[in-house]
Image: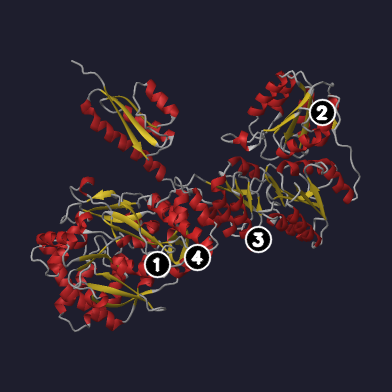
Amino acid sequence: MTTPPVSHVELRPGAYADSVTLLQVSRAVQGLDGVLAAQVAMATALNIEVLTEMGFEVPAEATTNDMVVALRLTDADALAAALSGVDQALRDANRRVEGSTEVAPSRTTASALRGAPGAVVVVSVPGSSALVEAMDALDAGSDVMIFSDNVPVEQEVALKRTAADRGLLVMGPDCGTAVVGGLGLGFANVVSPGPVGIVAASGTGCQQLLALLDHAGVGVTSALGVGGRDLSAEVRGVSTREAMRRLDEDPAIELIVVVSKPPADDVAAEITAYADSLATPVELVLLGAGEPDLTAGAEAVLRRLGRDLPAWPVAGGTTSGSGLIRGLFVGGTLKSEAQLIAGTDAGHTFVDFGDDAYTTGRAHPMIDPALRLEHLARAAADLATGVLLLDVVLGHGAEPDPAALLAPAVAAVSQPVVIAVVGTDGDPQDRDRQVRALVEAGAEVHLSNAGATRRALELIGAHA
Amino acid sequence: MSTPEAVVNVGADLLADAVADQAVAVTRVDWRPPMTGTEADLATVAADPLRRTANERALAAMLGVTATLVDVAPASELLGLEPGQFLHAGPPIEWSRASGPLRGALMGGAALEGLVDDPEDAVALFESGANVSLEPCHHRSAVGPMAGVVTPSMWMFVLEDAATGRRTYCSLNEGLGKVLRYGAYGPEVLTRLRWMRDVLGPLLQTAVRASGPVDVTGILTQMLQMGDEAHNRNRAGTLMLLRDLSPAMVTSGMDSADVAEGLRFIGGNDHFFLNLAMPACKLALDAARGIEGSTMVVAMARNGTDFGIQTAGTGDEWFTGPAQVADGLYLGDYGPDDANPDIGDSAITETAGIGGFAMATAPAIVRLVGGSVPDALATTRRMHEITLGENPRWTVPVLEFQGVPSGIDVTRVCRTGILPQINTGMAGAKAGVGQVGAGLVNPPAEIFPKALARLAELTRSRAQ
């Protein structure tokens, strides 16, 4: 006579093996006498689903840090042998993994820097852990770029004061872009070396400047991000001063350009005084209400260098529309600039999908375009929408082919679409191909974000 | 600014890829979230202006100590220990919470001191608490392996730091198997202890006084190159000690049969040197005590019930959690159910960078503790992730003479979740059984966040 099969499910909190190993373990256990089915897996949602489908009941308290051992046996007597088979298989699997002579990667920045002394450190861990990793860099005498956002301002101050005491540079936090001696860090455009050095409190603002100067044939040797709060009353421009000092020491740099929102009043005086003490001239490009836009700033830089002003390129064209501007941006500074130029009184709206509100738990829109594409379709369906104003930011770190998804979405829109494509012809995405694809989809493409915004206003018959 | 030659990336892989695409070497940190709930304390301690210098001082103080064996004498003389006073391993504990092996050792110790005739009678003595007191070895500048019980008549090694005159103490090693420190208290145990008191102690005293200080730190340097890790393997160290002391033992004028027995006992006890390695490590670590702001661990110790740590920056406070049962191999028919949780001050060796931390240099015993040679290499490398530096004197030939990982940093343990690896013997859980096996064990994870929280609290109070 036959007895009904017996099920056994147990959780092993804290036990861990990778999925490939556990697959091998499950297979090994399935081959044992008295075992009808066996599944040893980490209790991820997916695995619990699989186990449930196999007819096992996984305890509700299971978390992804628990290992589940689920066995179906011919009878209860087979349990002991099956469990020892599981343990044996896990041990065997571990033996192979642990027996590897490969050197495990470093687990902290401090440890990594022992093997790479003098390296520049790029930190993009969650904001709550950013100070700890960045402090490792400063302790080892390395400059650090902090890409992470959500770093408390008092931690920023602590890091920057420590760096200042040691002659080191903290770029960030929330620093998206830097070019250090020609090496792009974060989201950075490929530019030729040249006479300009930039200190930027804004990532996409810096990228716009890089792209415009590149078009004008002016190279940039270094562009040092300092984070959006550096010139605030709390932080007091500590990194801005250090970055200016570095650029001043570089004989290749003829003009230092500082790009920032207007500093806190007394900080502005300190920075101006510091700029005056340097051998290299300093051009301030201030962003915000009542200040010139980025394109005007680039023009001021060119004039200061005695260069001719080029015409900022425009590709394609579009018909006029009527209604409101819907600005959908991935660059925070680009969104702010457009909003300042167009104003919101008339009902125009501008959204930055790189804002924390949109990036919690998902990648930045310069990497993952899905959210903006969804909003694009929604805005296009809105009868009040007269023109769509977008940006596309190219360079290292950004989406490899933004037009691949954006161009079809643009083609599906009935309203006119104006896009600022911020990039250089050296960027890995092949800027000209991107522009071509967007133009073919019906968009009008500008290099200047300010130019694109003014064009959008013009298309709906308004004036800036 | 010159182009960085190398970048360390911690966080998003995408940013590392962008650097690699520009043909610059990038080291990727295998970052994972820190131990649960430690982010804020980690940031506080990392930003402590005292921390870096304090840790440099603590490490340098530890590495700067040379321990020499200067004398051997009874605990009553050296520590003023009086009848009824018992020292034990680990953090403070009372009889009611004491584990089997600690109780067994205390019972044997009471019989050795003549407080009771039969060790079994000592139970009532300790339960009453009258005229007996328990105190950690660590509180008296001493360390004791396993149960670590020291009574007034036991002879102790005296180690001295010549530069400061500071001293530490440790009892003489009894050998393996049925011995007091593993909780055995049978007649053969007491007979051996009496012989050690009456013959071995005086013999060693005469020999050490005659031959002059023995450089214990120097022997450790050599034995680490001879396959000893100085916790579970002390064979080369023991023989080198014998080499240094045997001429003076022979010419001591003591009965030649006693001298021969002394030589035979030491030569036949591969662990004899452990009781010199331990106080040498304590002497080095004690030099780092009381350094405000330092996050370095200066003691790890177990009493068979609790595992405790002390740090350089938190004074004499113990941070404790439940001692774990070692994972390893068992003698004879013993199994995991027979083993007592981790016990002994011998983890002072790991605290100083040897023992489990120097596993790579002792491939001969990796099987004893249930591992493989690649495991041993990986273990030592992994310990570098949680330590402040390397010991330039104590090096590991197979790792290209890299110094042993030294100075456990509480913050790095919390950041990586990597726990110190300890090689250990296993005592029987029942009083009187003795040794049942040997294996690998870790501290309970929660004691590191506890110590971190206290360090953070002290940091915050200094900042006010």
Frontmost residue, A357 versus A220: A357
C-alpha separation, residue under disc 3 versus residue under disc 4: 20 Å
Q: Do badges 3 and 1 share one subunit? A: no
The secondary structure type at the circle numbered 2 is helix
Upstream in sequence: badge 2 or badge 3: 3
Q: Which mark is residue B54?
A: 4
On the image, the x and y values in percent for residue B233 come to 31, 61
The three-letter code of the residue at mark 1 reads Leu
Frontmost residue, A140 versus A459: A459
The three-letter code of the residue at mark 3 reads Ala
The secondary structure type at the circle numbered 1 is helix
Query: Pointer 4 indicates a residue of which chain?
Result: B
Label 3 sits on residue: A164
Front: mark 2 or 1: 2
Label 1 sits on residue: B285
Label 2 sits on residue: A456
On the image, the x and y values in percent for residue B212 come to 32, 82
Front: mark 1 or 4: 4
Q: How many marks?
A: 4
On the image, the x and y values in percent for residue B66 come to 40, 73
Q: Tell me whether circle 1 and circle 4 mark residues in contact (CB < 8 Å).
A: no
The image quarter containing residue B216 is bottom left
Q: Tell me whether circle 2 and circle 1 mark residues in contact (CB < 8 Å).
A: no
Q: Do badges 2 and 1 share one subunit? A: no
Local packing at callout 1 (Cα closer than 10 Å; few below 14, some 14-19, many 20+) is many
The three-letter code of the residue at mark 2 reads Ala
C-alpha separation, residue under disc 3 versus residue under disc 1: 33 Å
On the image, the x and y values in percent for residue B31 come to 52, 46
C-alpha separation, residue under disc 1 versus residue under disc 4: 14 Å
Query: Pointer 3 indicates a residue of which chain?
Result: A
